[in-house]
Image (spheres, rainbow, N blue to C red):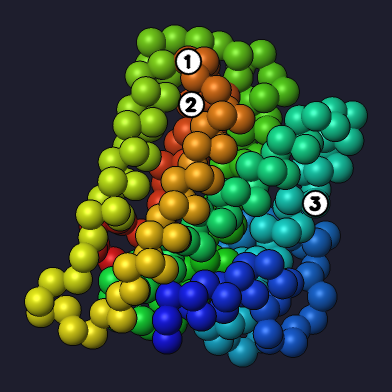
């Protein structure tokens, strides 16, 4: 399977509720009351990989909708959070996609995408809470260092992706240089857009946003 075809499958998996697997509607009342693991336990009758994916996706979608409702009175912040969520999710999809290429394929990498959304939604909720609180505006040397380090870490991640070429013993890797470059370019563009939104102020909210940016689901250099 080429990188492009894999990307299309990942897009379907991450953007369509439940992917290609028919399922019961999400139970948002439950999702908003319990953690993602408990939600999966209470909603999956006969466990399967796809059911686990769907449970994680549904929990994240329910929590995203709930967060959106709490931000009704702050439409500018709500719009920024929605944009950041979409961008962070796409980053996670690209990270999984490229790790799958390096590994020569495998369903693990597609399953990792929706399952990462539950953790991501918790992080986004923290970011939104800090953005609305004086706590988020508190500055300090620690926060400033974290922002600076995150920017460097993101640049290093992108650089590692750009350096990658399959080794002589990696005949299982179906590597297309043009497709790889296009995905890495998109990843870098997303990262720059996120950083432009977050800014460089050394406060708690900004540091939290950068921590999300530099929390990939897979490394850039082959550890998967």
- Would residue 51 be seen by someone viewing this image from the given angle? yes
Residue at image point 48% right, 26% down: 207
Residue 204 image position (x, y, % from top left): 53, 21
Question: Is residue 146 depicted above or below 211 in this figure?
Answer: above
| C-alpha gap between disc 1 and disc 3 | 29 Å
What SS does tag 2 mark? helix
Give the label on residue 202, or none: 1
Residue 146 image position (x, y, % from top left): 38, 24
Which quarter of the image is occupied by the N terminus?
A: bottom left
Determine whether label 2 and label 3 are within 8 Å by CB.
no
What SS does tag 1 mark? loop
Q: Is residue 46 left or right of residue 107?
A: right
Picture quadrant where residue 156 is located: top left
**Earlier sequence position, callout 2 versus callout 3:** 3
**Earlier sequence position, callout 1 versus callout 3:** 3
Q: Which residue is mark 2?
A: 207
Residue at image point 13% right, 72% down: 167
Badge 2: residue crowd in 10 Å (few <14, some 14–19, many ≥20): many
163 or 85: which is nearer to us?
A: 163
Give the label on residue 65, or none: 3
Determine whether label 2 and label 1 are within 8 Å by CB.
yes
Residue at image point 34% right, 74% down: 176
| C-alpha gap between disc 2 and disc 1 | 7 Å
């Amino acid at each position: 399977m080429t990188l492009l075809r894999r990307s299309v499958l990942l897009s379907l998996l991450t953007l369509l509720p439940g992917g290609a697997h028919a399922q019961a509607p999400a139970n948002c009342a439950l999702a908003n009351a319990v953690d993602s693991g408990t939600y999966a336990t209470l909603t999956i009758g006969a466990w399967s990989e796809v059911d686990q994916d769907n449970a994680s996706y549904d929990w994240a979608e329910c929590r995203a909708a709930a967060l959106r409702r709490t931000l009704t009175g702050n439409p500018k912040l709500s719009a920024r959070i929605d944009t950041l969520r979409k961008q962070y999710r796409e980053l996670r999809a690209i990270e999984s996609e490229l790790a799958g290429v390096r590994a020569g394929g495998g369903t693990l990498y597609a399953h990792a995408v929706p399952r990462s959304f539950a953790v991501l939604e918790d992080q986004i909720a923290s970011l939104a809470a800090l953005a609305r609180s004086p706590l988020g505006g508190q500055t300090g040397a620690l926060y400033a260092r974290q922002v600076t380090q995150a920017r460097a870490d993101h640049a290093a991640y992108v650089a590692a992706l750009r350096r990658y070429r399959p080794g002589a013993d990696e005949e299982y890797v179906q590597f297309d240089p043009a497709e790889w470059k296009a995905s890495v370019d998109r990843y870098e563009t997303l990262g720059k857009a996120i950083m432009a939104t977050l800014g460089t102020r050394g406060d708690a909210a900004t540091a939290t946003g950068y921590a999300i940016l530099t929390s990939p689901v897979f490394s850039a250099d082959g550890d998967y």
